[in-house]
C-alpha cells in the first residue's frame, strides 16, 4: 500500500517539474561544476603553453573550452529550476561569457604584466583571472541567465 503512495508522490513530483534549489545548494553545485571546468581550462592552458602557443591565445582557447563545458553542466546540474528560454537563454549565456572572456583574458594579461617574474607567475595570474571571472559569472548566471 505504501508503494502506491510513493509512486503517486513521485509522479506528482515529475509532473510539477524540478524542485526549487536554494542559494547555498546552487553555490555548492556551482563551485563543484566550476572546479571541474577549471580543470578543463587549466589543463588545456598548460598543454597549449607547453606546445609553444602564444600565452594569450592559449588562454583564449582554454577559456572557450572551459566555458562551453560550464554552460552545459551548469544548465544540467546547478540551475535546474531555471525557466528554459531556449535560444534566448543560450544567447544570454554567450553574451555574459563574451564579457567574462575579455575580463578573464585581460585580468590574466594584466597580472602577467604587473607580477614579478617567478616560477609560478603564470599559475598565479590564471588563479586571479579565474577568481574575478567566477564571481561575475555566478552572480549574473543566477540573476539573469538561469533565473526562475
Image (spheres, helix red, strand yellow):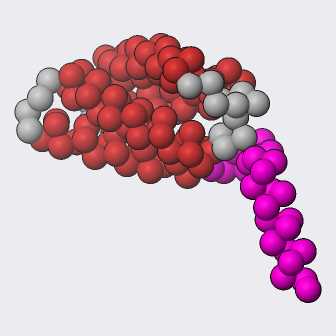
**Residue 93 in the image, given as x and y percentages of width and height:** 52, 23
Question: Picture quarter containing residue 64?
Answer: top left
Name the side, left or right, on which 55 lies relative to 30.
left
Q: Which residues are magenta?
A: 1-29
| Residue 14 located within the stretch drawn in magenta | yes
Question: Image point 56% across, 25% down: which residue?
Answer: 86
Q: Residue furthest left?
A: 52
Looking at the figure, which quarter contains the C terminus? top right
**Residue 10 in the image, given as x and y percentages of width and height:** 79, 65
**Residue 141 in the image, given as x and y percentages of width and height:** 62, 28
Q: Nearer the viewer, residue 81 or 102?
A: 81
Q: Is residue 75 visible?
A: yes
Most common secondary structure along the magenta stretch: helix
| Residue 64 located within the stretch drawn in magenta | no
Question: Image point 16% across, 37% down: which residue?
Answer: 48
Question: Image point 44% across, 28% down: which residue?
Answer: 129
Amino acid at each position: 500500500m505504501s508503494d502506491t503512495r510513493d509512486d503517486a508522490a513521485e509522479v506528482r513530483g515529475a509532473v510539477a517539474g524540478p524542485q526549487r534549489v536554494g542559494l547555498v545548494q546552487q553555490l555548492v553545485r556551482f563551485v563543484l561544476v566550476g572546479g571541474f571546468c577549471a580543470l578543463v581550462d587549466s589543463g588545456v592552458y598548460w598543454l597549449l603553453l607547453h606546445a609553444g602557443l602564444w600565452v594569450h591565445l592559449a588562454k583564449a582557447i582554454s577559456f572557450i573550452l572551459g566555458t562551453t563545458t560550464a554552460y552545459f553542466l551548469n544548465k544540467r546540474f546547478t540551475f535546474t529550476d531555471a525557466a528554459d528560454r531556449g535560444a534566448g537563454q543560450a544567447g544570454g549565456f554567450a553574451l555574459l561569457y563574451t564579457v567574462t572572456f575579455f575580463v578573464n583574458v585581460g585580468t590574466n594579461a594584466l597580472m602577467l604584466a604587473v607580477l614579478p617574474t617567478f616560477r609560478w607567475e603564470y599559475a598565479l595570474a590564471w588563479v586571479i583571472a579565474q577568481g574575478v571571472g567566477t564571481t561575475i559569472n555566478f552572480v549574473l548566471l543566477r540573476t539573469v541567465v538561469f533565473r526562475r
